[in-house]
Amino acid sequence: MNDSPRSVFLVGMMGAGKTTVGRLLASALGFEFIDADRELEARSGALIATIFSVEGEEGFRRRESALIDELTQRPGIVLATGGGAVLNADTRRRLKERGLVVYLRASGEEIHRRTRKDRSRPLLQTADPRSRIDALLEQRQPLYEEAAHLTYQSASANPKRLVRKLLEEPAIRRLSQAAP
């Protein structure tokens, strides 16, 4: 990471609270909030599930990587990345070099609880979504940790409390003081 990050990038599994925490954090910092998945849908005119079904996960990941490359060059944003964004080594490197990366960690049980009724998540459309979550966590957790400057346990009951903790972080305080 450069000496003075200009943005905050949130990484973690689907359902870890990146969007909720990201909106609150962006508001507190006076930054723009961007959800990478929603931005990708808006630009492509198709839902992520549709992109997955037409282009496969590989096609989706190519689009996601290009979008994150562009977005991470913007100053003054809080970016909620998709859960699998860290699968791409170049994306992990760009995130770490271009901003302050916060990993929102959540247990498999918590992720399952938060996502079990959500039919819009292509990777969970299996006979056993809980096992799929555990497998994804096992694969991705080391990548989240590699990309992250800071790691916080996701606070499902109180995202505002988590944001208050984040705002106490020296690196994030410096960001807020440097904001225009």
Image (spheres, grey):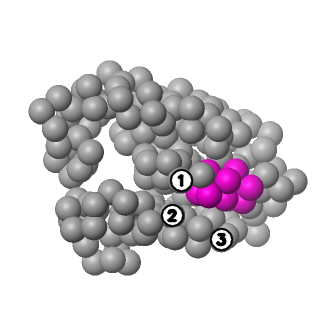
- Whether residue 96 appears in magenta in the rendering, the answer is yes
N-terminal of the pair, mark 3 or mark 1, is 3
Secondary structure predominantly adopted by residues drawn in magenta = helix
Q: Quadrant of residue 156?
A: top left
Identified by mark 2, the residue type is Ser
Q: Is residue 73 visible?
A: yes
Q: Residue at x 35, y 26 (%)?
A: 134
Identified by mark 1, the residue type is Asn
Is 163 located above or below residue 6 in the figure? above
Residue marked by disc 1: 88
Q: Is residue 113 visible?
A: no
Is 169 located above or below residue 19 in the figure? above
Residue marked by disc 2: 65
Which residue occupies the foreground of this view, 18 or 55? 55
Q: Residue at x 42, y 39 (%)?
A: 13
Q: Are marks 1 and 2 in contact (CB under 8 Å)?
A: yes
**What span is colored magenta in the figure?**
90-99
Across and down, in percent, residue 94 comes to: 67, 58
Which secondary structure lies at badge 2?
A: helix
Is 77 located above or below residue 152 in the figure? below
Q: Residue at x 17, y 29 (%)?
A: 128
Q: Residues within 10 Å of mark 3 (few under 14, many from 20)?
A: some
Residue marked by disc 3: 74
